[in-house]
Amino acid sequence: MPTISMFYGIIVRMFYDEHAPPHFLAQYGEFKASIAIDDLKILDGKLPRRALELTLDWAELHRAELLEDWALCLRHQHPHKIAPLQ
């Protein structure tokens, strides 16, 4: 499960050969959430409000890159790093 970005204590990862819909995993401390790339809705889990807001802001800015990384992961290729939220 490669880490593709880290910012403000949030770690963003993608799994290889994962099920649809395209999504990523965000972790903040003991909290984890799976978030759909297309509509940025939580598929599973939860994050504290502020961590979720930061994660969604970041994902909105990098949606195209997230979809590219999703395609790489489906082919069992290492995804590219994505710039952190600043």
Image: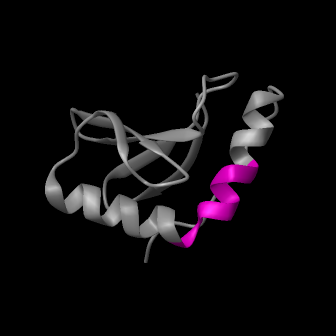
* Residue closest to the eye, 9 or 19: 19
The quadrant the N terminus occupies is top right
Is residue 83 toward the left or the right of residue 42 in the image? right
Tag count: 0
Q: In the rendered image of this protein, does residue 63 appear above or below residue 44?
A: below
Which residue is situated farthest in the left direction here?
A: 49
> From where the camera sits, is residue 80 visible?
no
Is residue 65 toward the left or the right of residue 53 in the image? right
> From where the camera sits, is residue 12 visible?
yes
Which residue is situated farthest in the bottom direction here?
A: 86
**What are the residue bounds of the magenta stretch?**
61-68
Is residue 69 toward the left or the right of residue 29 in the image? right
Q: Where is residue 57? Give x, y as percent.
A: 39, 69
The quadrant the C terminus occupies is bottom left
User: What residue is shown at x 53% (from left), y 40% (from top)?
Assistant: 23
Magenta residue check for 65:
yes
Q: Where is residue 63? Give x, y as percent.
A: 60, 62
Is residue 24 toward the left or the right of residue 17 in the image? left
By what rule are the colours in the image chosen? one colour
Magenta residue check for 34:
no
User: What residue is shown at x 49% (from left), y 61% (from top)?
Assistant: 59
Q: Main secondary structure of the magenta part?
A: helix
* Residue closest to the eye, 84 or 48: 48
Q: In the rendered image of this protein, does residue 9 appear above or below residue 23?
A: below
- The part of the image, by quadrant, that contains residue 49 is bottom left
User: What residue is shown at x 38% (from left), y 62% (from top)?
Assistant: 56
Q: Where is residue 64? Give x, y as percent.
A: 68, 63
Q: Where is residue 48? Give x, y as percent.
A: 16, 50
